[in-house]
Image (cartoon, rainbow, N blue to C red):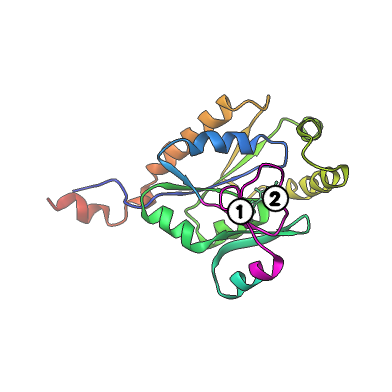
Amino acid sequence: MLQKPAKGLMIVVSGPAGSGKGTVLADLRRDKAFAYSVSATTRAPRPGEVDGEHYYFLTREEFEKKIARGEMLEYTEYCGNLYGTPKKEAERVIESGKHLLLEIEVQGAKNIKRAFPHAVTVMLLPPSFAVQEQRLRDRGTESEERILGRLERTKEELQDLSDYDYIVLNPDGGIADATAQIRAIVKAAESAAERFPDLAKHYFEN
Ligand code: 5GP
């Protein structure tokens, strides 16, 4: 008998600072079909960020120990800080049958796609660099220096998006459209033929 695949999908969502990614992902996370893996970072918490909820906030030394012990599924250096996905947590989610939502930047997404070719990668984008810059300033959570750092990084990151499976536009910073598009992408990926290995064998069995 054919059955729905037991394992969840790995869904990577990237987006430059100001793309609305945080809001879109917060919405998806409310859906029981998804689970979110809490990343580790060496950056300092922003006001209101809680350890173990938004990130595991680690010292560089603690982070490097985890890398050395092979405990990171992927990691990267971004604007002077390390960010990474703890392996154990990610595996637990996928085995549970929920879709793992990873919010990671371009280099991490590339590493994931290389290691897990079936991962679904989505880039969420504002309509233009100018709009992105405006949103980032309106957010008001970052110093001028950090804003400029993030904008510089965007210029590098957007040069080559050929590894991504999908681009989702977020024209007005609202969530409805972007969330619906990502849900549609996930819906299609749930039916990917590669998720049904040994199909004939199962089909002809009772
Ligand atoms: P922020 O400092 O704004 O929270 O995150 C900076 C960037 O790091 C964002 O693009 C975010 O998606 C990315 N990021 C967050 N967690 C991870 C992670 O576990 N791995 C990688 N590679 N990037 C991450």
Q: Is residue 163 above or below residue 32?
A: below
The numbered mark, 2 or 1, whose residue comes first in the sequence reads 2
Which residue is identified by label 2? 45
Q: Is residue 203 above or below residue 73?
A: above
**Residue 49 placement (x, y as % from top left):** 65, 45
Tag 1: amino acid? Ala
Q: Nearest the camera: 82 or 55?
A: 55
**Residue matched to label 1:** 109
From the viewer's perspective, is residue 82 above or below residue 164?
Answer: below
- Magenta segment: does it hold 56? yes
Q: Horizontal and vertical percent for residue 174? A: 63, 25
Q: Is residue 67 left or right of residue 199?
A: right
Where residue 71 sits, quadrant-wise, is bottom right
Percent coordinates x, y for residue 128 in the rendering: 76, 32
Q: Residue at x 77, y 39 (%)?
A: 141
Ligand 1 neighbours mark 1 (CB distance < 8 Å): yes
Identify the residue shown where x is 26% and y is 52%.
Answer: 199
Q: Which residues are magenta?
A: 37-63
Q: Alpha-carbon neighbours of circle 1 within 10 Å: few (<14), some, or many (≥20)? A: many
